[in-house]
Image (cartoon, rainbow, N blue to C red):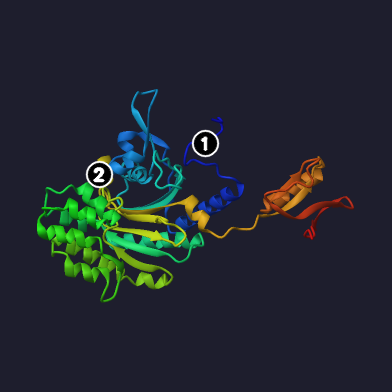
Amino acid sequence: MPRWLLPENIADVLPSEARAIEDLRRRLLDLYRSFGYELVMPPLLEHIESLLTGSGRELGLRTFKLVDQLSGRTLGLRADMTPQVARIDAHLLNRMGVARLCYAGSVLHARAAGIFATREPLQVGAEIYGHAGMEADLEVIELMLASLAAAGVGGVRLDLCHVGVAPALLAMDPSLDAAEIHAGLQRKDRPALEEALAGTEPIAREALLELTGLYGEASGPHSVLARARAVLPSLAAVDAALDELDRLVGSPMWARFPQVELSVDLADLRGYQYHTGVTFAAYVDAMPNAVARGGRYDDIGQAFGRARPATGFSLELRELASLARAEEPGRAIRAPWSEDAALAARIAALRAAGEIVVRVLPGHEHEQQEFACDRELELKGGVWELRTIAPAK
């Protein structure tokens, strides 16, 4: 095997793609700053018990593990930055009021999320800590939709869910295997669920089977929420979850996003092991999986000494950048190679003004460049002047 081959689902990022990714990363972080979010940069690896706190079995399976040669303890390479940001809020910042934090960085997955998915996603996200009300959920959803708009993504479908429904139904029969039922619901595999629920308490059985079909319109007389109230048992936790979704769907905020198709899917239970309330996922036609996900996870900071209300979202920057319209190469200025001090000063002034100036090395005057040089510096009467380059015919 050639030694330069990369591991499966790991790839280099070449100049044009890297430029698109980096431009989008800067736009998103500037967007989050305009909303009042502060940037944090957690480390790439931590002690495994800290990295996986409150995150559930699924994240543990995706986490690379290694032994620290200094301490002998097991370390993990982060597969998700949310637990790290929760640790920063709970243990390091230790603020009493609201904290708005954002992040951007690589994560590593021991197992790829899909056949063509990278095992080195570039994760970007934002979180609000310290507010339990729906105002925080609405703000992070608004910011997530603004992120997709900043990337030039249109035709978004936003699925809402509430992880309080399924556990309330499962609690009606403690003998049920919660992990098996959640997996069947997530796949909407009714035959498998019927088999797993054989002999179960009848009301719980029928309600859990009904969840597989409770997806679709978010509002109106035939909405998912209206159907859910008709077919699900009236349990306090179920009613409270449906009430929260009703309030969210009825928010005036949606009038600002007429291009977003709002729907509800009560079986979309990814991340149920650490989510505690409303969850949401954004889909676009060009991607088979969600392009962004988020939700409420109020208990994740408990192991760090402070269980604060929390909600947020994250997205994969490479996937999002690939959806954007390809941009033209950056406009640049070509300059000849010379040690002339006047030329060096002119180049420095142009670069300081924001221009890209490419110095052409001797013998490489006709080579292809990443940048589109539409002007060049030319010596005229002892002065280095800009000259427009006529486009090639």
Packing grade of label 1 (10 A; few <14, some 14-19, many >=20) is few
Q: Which mark is residue 6?
A: 1
Report the side of 25 relative to 365 (left or right): left
Seen at 21% across and 58% down, the residue is: 165
Residue 112 screen position, x and y as percent: 41, 43
Residue 340, image x, y percentages: 82, 42
Q: Amino acid at mark 1?
A: Leu
**Residue located 31% across and 37% down the image:** 50
Residue 255 located left or right of residue 183: right
Q: Position of residue 270 (x, y in %)?
A: 31, 52
Quadrant location of the N terminus?
top right
Crowding around mark 2 (Cα neighbors within 10 Å: few <14, some 14 to 19, many 20+) is some
Residue type, mark 2 in image: Gln
Describe the element under mark 2 as helix, strand or loop: helix
Name the one closer to the observer, 334 or 166: 166
Q: Quadrant of the C terminus?
A: bottom right
User: Could you tell me residue 153's position as x and y percent?
Assistant: 49, 62
The residue where tag 2 is placed is 302
Label 1 to label 2: alpha-carbon separation: 39 Å
